[in-house]
Each structure stands twice: as C-alpha cells, then as structure tokens.
Image (cartoon, helix red, strand yellow):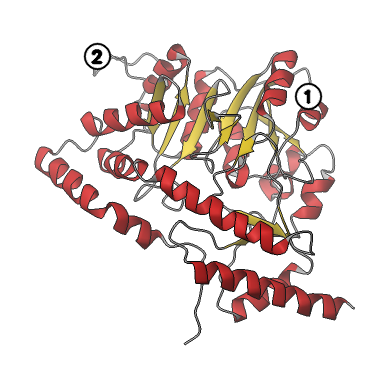
Amino acid sequence: MNQSVPFTDLAAMTGDIRPAVDRAWADLLDSSKFVGGDAVEDFEHAWASYCGVPEAVGVGNGTDALLLTLMALGIGTGDEVIVPTNTFIASAEAVVLAGAVPRFADVSPDTLLITPEQLEAALTRRAAAVIVVHLYGQMPDMDALQHAADRAGIVLIEDAAQAHGASWRGRQAGSIGRAGCFSFYPAKNLGAFGDAGAVVTADTVLADRIRCLRDHGRARCSRYQHEEVGTNSRLDALQASVLTAKLSKLDTWTEARRSIAARYRAAFGDGPARMVAEQPGSRGAYHLAVARVPDRAEVQRQLSAAGIETQIHYPIPCHRQAPYQCFAADPLPVAERTAGEILSLPIFPHMGEGQATLVCEAMCDALTVTESCLG
C-alpha cells in the first residue's frame, strides 16, 4: 500500500497528553467545577507566563478574544480598524461586530503579512487601531509596525490565533501590542478539544475590563451586580485543563514544525514552488506551511493522486468576500494575485521523515508535470 500523508494528525498530539488530560478531567468530574475555578486560573497564569506578560484572560474562542479586546478598548461606531485582507475572516468579522469599520490593507509579496508601508497607506483620520495578523504562525516586522502605529496614534492589537510559540526578536507573539488575541481551536498549535481562546496583555486595566465583559458585564465582587453590557464568553474548565496539559509539549511540537518547514524550504529552493518568506527577526511557529505554486489546481491534483492532503489558506481575500465588499475602497493587488497561488502543505509535530520526503518528492514531480503542461 502506498504511504499517504494527512494534512494534520490531531490524534497523535492527543496521545501525547491523554494521561494528563484523563487525570485532570477525572478531578473536574469529581468537583463539578466546570466553569471558572482553579483549572481556568491555572491555565491563565501559565499562558501569561509563557507569553511573557502579566495578564491572560481565557475566553470562549479566538473571535471573541478580538471582539472583547475591541469592546474593552472602546473601539466601535465611528472608528476604523486596519486589517490585512489576507487573513481568516474572523479578523475582520470582529471589527464589524464591534460596530467599527474594517479598513483593508494589502500585504507583502514575500511574507504575505502586513507591512508598515501598507498600514500607513490604509490610514484615515477615523483610524483607531490596527490588527496585525501573524498569519501561518509568522510574525511581521513588529518594531516598525509598532512605531508606525504609535506615530499615527492608534492601538496595535496582535491577532496571534495561528502564532502560539512564534517570536519577534525574542519576544513572544501576543506580548508586543496592547493585547494579543489567541484561538485554541483544536487544529491550532496549542488546541483545545473544542472552541477556546484568550487575550494576553501587560495592561491590567484592560484585562480586568475583558474579564468583566466576558462574564455578562458582572462586577468582580458581586454575582448579581452588572456594571455594563457584556456577553457570555467564559473559558470552560475542561478546555483549560486540556490546554494546560498541551502547553508542556508546545515548544517540542513547535521545533518539530520548524524542522519540517526547513525541509520544504531546502527541497524547493528557488524553484517554481517557493515557501512564503519568513521576516528577518521572526521565528515562526509554522502553524501552516504555505508555498506559492504555478497552476495550483494541477499541483493540488497531482499531490492528491500521490496520497498527500493539502488545503488553501485562504482562497478569497477578506475584501472580496460578499459581506465585506462594501468596505473595500481600492484594489489590493498582492493579496488578490497570491490568493490563486498559495497552497498549504502537510505539517504537524508527529510527521515522519518518510512523510516529509514523500511530500518533497511529490511536489517536485507535480511541478515537473505542470511545467511540461505549461510548455
């Protein structure tokens, strides 16, 4: 039987931490403390420490992390928030849900991430914030972006939903902007067994306001006193216990991802398939291994025939999505062009040497066929 390569393997990751999760869940089942409590607080402390900030607030999911951050900062009606158009839709969705307007920016042709120049090109007098997305687990030039945001007098928020364990010049993703927003969706580098998220920050006042908003606007010292209109976005204790168990493995898993990405980069070199560049100063977490390829449909078909599962992140830029076209003022040519070229290759911590070799060889074979077809 020919070897196949799945896009990811969550079962293997679960196997690494199942004994710890079984013990933690047994304790929770005995205590019945399913919302809040020690399990959530323990994870929040551990995640804040990992990210190098004093505060972490667990929430229901990554979209809520962004939305609650915007709400807590008072960003809403009358404000614009700059968002790179090459991102998962939640980055823009949270802005609209907060009552603000997303102002879409193009991205670098090398990293496919926002740059200071594109941030500045998208600025208007109504701009209140920029959401810098660490897409694919890669970080852009955070020093230059923070400087540009400070010069413009706007808040920098990190969308680190794919960047658990990534760093910029030794600083962890989420620790550089006013707040860092994480998703712990099961497929993420640090994933729960369902939806979960968190906001990390060095701003204690902001953290306290997010804690209030995530819990129906409830006052900290009173169960039945509500200080403002909030929502229900609490991190479940069951998910927190999973995340605590997985956190002990995150660095090891991240190094494995980096090793696989390096294999791909070396194998493809300067050929027709090129891995998305890593910004100098960034140390990526490689949630995704994204290559730009000619005739993507044919390459994807060839890889599928070889038993290799691939995906596309993301085939339609946000500003081209139907609900968001009304916010698109100008063409964004880099994102529009590269959306038809990007292909996400298999990458997961337990990927074997033979599987990585198979992907490299199959990609080279597919490109040979593609180049022949293109003449």
- Name which residue lies at 36% across and 32% down: 232
- Name which residue lies at 29% across and 15% down: 220
Seen from the viewer's position, the closer of residues 123 and 291 is 291
Seen from the viewer's position, the closer of residues 8 and 197 is 8
Contact (CB < 8 A) between labels 1 and 2?
no
Residue 190 seen from this side: no
Residue type at mark 1: give it.
Leu
Q: Kindly identify which residue carries mark 1.
A: 123
Q: Kindly identify which residue carries mark 2.
A: 222
Query: For residue 214, what is the image quadrant?
Result: top left
Quadrant where the C terminus lies? bottom right
How crowded is the residue under tag 2: few (<14 C-alpha within 10 Å), some, or many (20+)?
A: few
Secondary structure at badge 1 equals loop
Residue at the farthest right position: 375
216 in relation to 139, above or below: above
Query: For residue 265, what is the image quadrant?
Result: bottom right
Seen from the viewer's position, the closer of residues 260 and 157 is 260
